[in-house]
Image (tube, coloured by chain):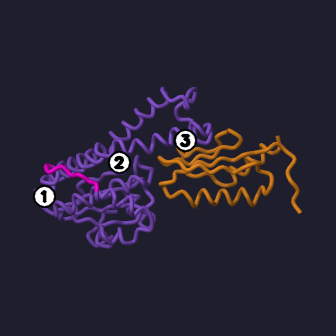
Chain colours: A orange, B purple
Amino acid sequence: METLAAHKPVKVTIVYCASCGYEPYTLDLVSALMKTFLYDLAAIEIIPWQDGAFDVVVNGDMIHSMYRDGGFPANETIIAAVRERLAQ
Amino acid sequence: MAVTRERFEQGLTYDGYKAQMTRNLDRFEENERTLELAADDVQFFKSLPQTVHVLAITEDWCGDAIANLPILGGLAQASDKLNVRVFLRDQNLDLIDQYLKDGQHRSIPVFAFFDEDFRPIGHWIERPASITAMQSEAMAELYATAPELAGVVPGTSPGQLPEAARNRMMQFFGSFRAQHRAEADAEVVRELRELVAAGLSK
């Protein structure tokens, strides 16, 4: 049985353009985070936005921005960023 | 790859597109019902020397498409000179990839115009540049005056903003379209009119 995590809480925020058809990418990332981290995440926040946005913020740090970096992030990139913060 | 008559005719009619929409049909039809076209603009399209074929690329989840495709539909209906075929972006990547915004974004809607011999006249993407600029100016003013955005650096990701700041910005987005709808529609018609006039005069 999984136990509740004892390390510093990590929160992931996903901002997605709600009028751009980005729901599948958003839900795929959420699913990957849920399956990978179980109880280790304090929260996964999903924010509907517009103008083509797709940002992922982990504990306040921008890990990916569609405007800045282009395209969608690989799930592994976000998972690695979460792991790094869980280990701190 | 050039768009051929055969490829064009594979598209949906305007009414056929509406019939297969799975969301936002109410907003789409509200925009149709409330569209106001200037008589001068209608006359311009009515007076075109030939039927113009218009390839529209869209999706029913796209806000700009919900706003702007009804304008093309209204012009087509009022003028009887625009032969419109509609293609779903995500099922027609061969088409959308010919009309990338800034060479990289699959932005919609796209309206691509062809003369009666299927020579390209020009194409239009997403929304008028002037409306994007107007929204940016209004947003800058919001940053300067809204208490919820005090101290926030413009361009900060919504994911890094306090909830009150995010809510204020969403309120702004909602009211901007409502307040500027007539100007935005007029700008779309003006740009389409200029594009067709310039294209047919070549």
The residue shown at (39%, 62%) is B26
Residue B37 among magenta residues: yes
- The quadrant of the picture occupied by the N terminus of chain B is bottom left
For residue B140, above or below residue A47: above
Q: Quadrant of residue A32?
A: bottom right
First of labels 2, 1 by sequence position: 1
Residue B167: numbered disc:
3
The amino acid pointed to by label 3 is Asn
User: Which residue is the site of mark 2?
Assistant: B127
Q: Residues within 10 Å of mark 2 (few under 14, many from 20)?
A: many
The amino acid pointed to by label 2 is Arg
The amino acid pointed to by label 1 is Lys
The residue shown at (62%, 51%) is A46
Bounds of the magenta segment: B34-40
Give the chain letter at badge 3.
B
Instruction: Give the alpha-carbon distance from disc 3 to disc 1, as whole Å.
Output: 45 Å
Q: Secondary structure at mark 1?
A: helix
Q: Position of residue B123 (x, y in %)?
A: 29, 53
Give the chain letter at badge 1.
B
For residue B195, above or below residue B46: above
Q: Quadrant of residue B59?
A: bottom left
Residue B46: numbered disc:
1
Q: Position of residue B40 (x, y in %)?
A: 13, 49
Q: Residues within 10 Å of mark 3 (few under 14, many from 20)?
A: some
Looking at the rendered structure, whether the residues under marks 3 and 1 are on a common chain is answered as yes
